[in-house]
């Protein structure tokens, strides 16, 4: 893909929370169902369009599609969403596995890799049959976070401790198999890898912090490097395995070490905070691929201020020559919290609906409109690629 070929039909994307993991206590989450996005997908996509947003991130929910056993696909959970996207002209990046998989499948088994590949190929064919276009896929969302939360701390599936590196390698192996299978099934399928961009700072003038901070920061690149074959080439990675890179960046993505090498979130006002524009440049310089903000948000009344900060950093990055191609408001729809079902007010849309329409959080909507106008001006000046073709 040429550096300035546009990825998306609009600069802003709307990302629908689609986590489907099992928690440590055994409860299965399904955020698409709990926000009723499965029932309101068409209206949700139409409401995105009312705000100039014609692209989205969404999920397929593997645990439902292949619930009955190997190769026994039930596409009813995703077909209405595929068709809603088609009717509304919404371009969707589909997550095939957003932390969750069928209950009958052992994550650490060889079968996990082969089943994921077959499922990816089957979905690619389905998407092509429904839309007439090769799909855009994020095979396995946030490999690094899955490795930490599922493999290192046991917070959710596969609920193991101290096996983070093993989880990461298995997730990369599955991602590579899925990528090859989907592209073989539907040539032209594009594959994105979306990972958190986290940076850890040591305490000033504390030599003991240097090595732990370096080690933490090196881990940020591992999933991307493995997919591209630059690290652990025995997994099968190669430079052609990745079309674009999604970067997830929240208010708490920079940390500082303190006593005992525990870490705490760093304030954006801390003098050590690295501007997002510089982090975006590091990613692009390292991988020489189109980059976009795959997730960003904050809760409460700071929503417009945070988006303004992110967008201004993106505009500064573009002006300096880093081809950032989009910003995804993730989640675009407020939702119940993973651990306690508390309401998380972090979206452009609130979860309750009236006659099928979501309530709009007006301060954020006004900021989106203002920023859209700025990005349009940059597009007119040639600094931002024109939208991807329908």
Image (tube, grey):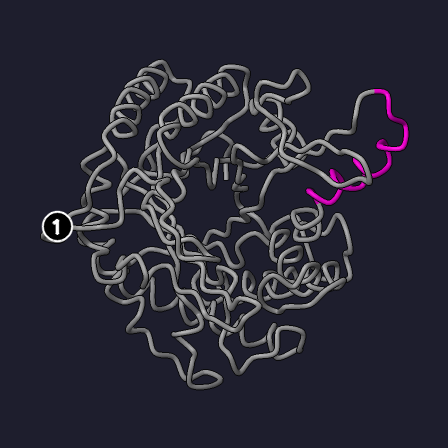
Relative image position of residue 221 (x, y in whole percent)? 69, 43
Name the residue at 41% across, 66% down.
Answer: 61
Relative image position of residue 212 (x, y in whole percent)? 82, 39
Residue under label 1: 354
- Name above or below for residue 240 compared with residue 386: below
- Name above or below for residue 318 compared with residue 71: above
Relative image position of residue 297 (x, y in whole percent)? 43, 36
Q: Nearer the viewer, residue 200 or 96?
A: 200
Outermost residue to the left: 355
Using the rendered image of the protein, determine whether residue 268 is visible from the camera's viewpoint: yes
Quadrant of the image containing the C terminus: top left
Q: Main secondary structure of the magenta part?
A: helix
Q: Nearer the viewer, residue 275 or 175?
A: 275
Looking at the image, residue 64 sits to the left or right of residue 173; the answer is left
Relative image position of residue 86 (x, y in whole percent)? 23, 54
Name the residue at 25% across, 24% down.
Answer: 366
Q: Quadrant of residue 124?
A: bottom left
Looking at the image, residue 245 sits to the left or right of residue 71; the answer is right
**Span shown in magenta:** 205-221
- Name above or below for residue 197 compared with residue 130: above
Looking at the image, residue 288 sits to the left or right of residue 138; the answer is right
Q: Secondary structure at mark 1?
A: strand
Using the rendered image of the protein, determine whether residue 188 is visible from the camera's viewpoint: no
Indicate yes or no whether the magenta region holds residue 313: no
């Amino acid at each position: 893909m040429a550096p300035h070929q546009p990825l998306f039909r609009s600069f802003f994307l709307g990302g629908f929370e689609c986590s489907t993991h099992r928690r440590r206590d055994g409860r299965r989450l399904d955020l698409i169902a709990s926000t009723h996005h499965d029932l309101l997908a068409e209206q949700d996509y139409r409401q995105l369009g009312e705000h100039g947003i014609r692209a989205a991130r969404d999920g397929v929910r593997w645990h439902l599609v292949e619930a009955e056993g190997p190769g026994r696909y039930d596409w009813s959970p995703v077909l209405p969403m595929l068709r809603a996207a088609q009717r509304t002209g919404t371009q969707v990046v589909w997550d095939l596995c957003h932390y969750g998989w069928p209950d009958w499948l052992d994550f650490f088994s060889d079968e996990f890799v082969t089943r994921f590949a077959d499922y990816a190929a089957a979905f690619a064919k389905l998407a092509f049959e429904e839309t007439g276009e090769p799909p855009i896929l994020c095979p396995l969302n946030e490999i690094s976070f899955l490795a930490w939360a599922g493999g290192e701390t046991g917070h959710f599936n596969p609920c193991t401790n101290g096996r983070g590196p093993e989880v990461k390698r298995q997730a990369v192996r599955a991602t590579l198999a899925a990528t090859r299978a989907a592209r073989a099934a539907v040539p032209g399928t594009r594959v994105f890898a979306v990972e958190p961009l986290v940076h850890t700072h040591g305490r000033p003038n504390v030599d003991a912090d240097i090595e732990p901070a370096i080690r933490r920061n090196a881990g940020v690149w591992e999933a991307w490097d493995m997919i591209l074959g630059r690290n652990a080439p025995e997994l099968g990675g190669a430079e052609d395995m990745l079309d674009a890179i999604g970067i997830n960046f929240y208010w708490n993505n920079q940390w500082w070490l303190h006593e005992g090498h525990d870490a705490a979130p760093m304030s954006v006002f801390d003098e050590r905070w690295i501007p997002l524009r510089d982090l975006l440049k590091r990613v692009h310089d390292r991988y020489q691929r189109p980059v976009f903000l795959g997730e960003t948000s904050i809760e409460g009344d700071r929503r417009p201020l945070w988006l303004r900060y992110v967008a201004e950093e993106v505009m500064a990055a573009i002006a300096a020559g880093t081809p950032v191609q989009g910003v995804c408001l993730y989640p675009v729809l407020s939702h119940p919290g993973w651990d306690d079902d508390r309401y998380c007010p972090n979206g452009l849309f609130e979860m309750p609906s009236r006659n099928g329409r979501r309530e709009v959080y007006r301060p954020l909507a006004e900021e989106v409109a203002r920023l859209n106008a700025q990005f349009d001006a940059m597009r007119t000046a040639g600094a931002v690629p024109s939208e991807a073709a329908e």
